[in-house]
Amino acid sequence: MDSKRGKYAWTVTVGEKGQIVIPKQARDIFNIKPGDTLIMLADDKKGIAIPPKSSFAELAAKIFADKEQDEK
């Protein structure tokens, strides 16, 4: 799915070994190359996210802030 506002959605299939293939269009848009390390974030209520490496620090800060609020 292609969007003019920078929003995208794809489907992937999970293989027998639990592996997924990142769609080519997504790899091209986010400059994902063979050998790159990706970060997978998960929340049992919100789901799974695989953010661009460059946004990890910002996302981690939000995640840990949410955790601190949940503990209060």
Image: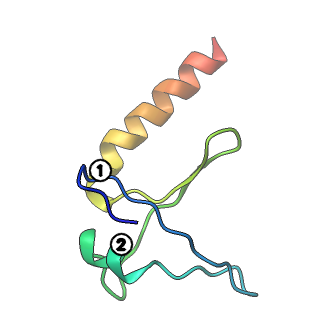
Query: Residue 17 location in percent, x, y?
Result: 72, 86
Residue at x-position 57% and y-position 27%: 67
Asked if residue 69 lies left or right of residue 61, the reply is: right
Res 61 → quadrant: top left
Rendering colour mode:
rainbow
Give above or below for 47 relative to 31: above
In the image, farthest residue toward the right: 16
Q: Pick the residue in front: 15 or 72.
A: 15
Q: Are marks 2 and 1 in contact (CB under 8 Å)?
A: no
At label 2, counting other C-alpha atoms closer than 10 Å, the crowd grade (few under 14, some 14-19, many 20 or more) is few
How far is disc 2 from disc 1 in space, using C-alphas? 16 Å
Nearer the camera: disc 2 or disc 1: 2
Q: Earlier in the sequence, mark 2 or mark 1?
A: 2
Residue linked to disc 2:
26
Query: Residue 71 location in percent, x, y?
Result: 65, 18
Query: The C terminus lies in which quarter of the figure?
Result: top right
User: Helix, strand or loop at disc 2?
Assistant: helix
Residue linked to disc 1:
55
Q: Amino acid at mark 1?
A: Ser
Residue at x-position 35% and y-position 72%: 26
Q: Amino acid at mark 2?
A: Ala
In the image, farthest residue toward the top: 72
Q: Pick the residue in front: 51 or 35.
A: 51
User: Helix, strand or loop at disc 1?
Assistant: helix
Query: The N terminus lies in which quarter of the figure?
Result: bottom left
Residue at x-position 38% and y-position 59%: 8
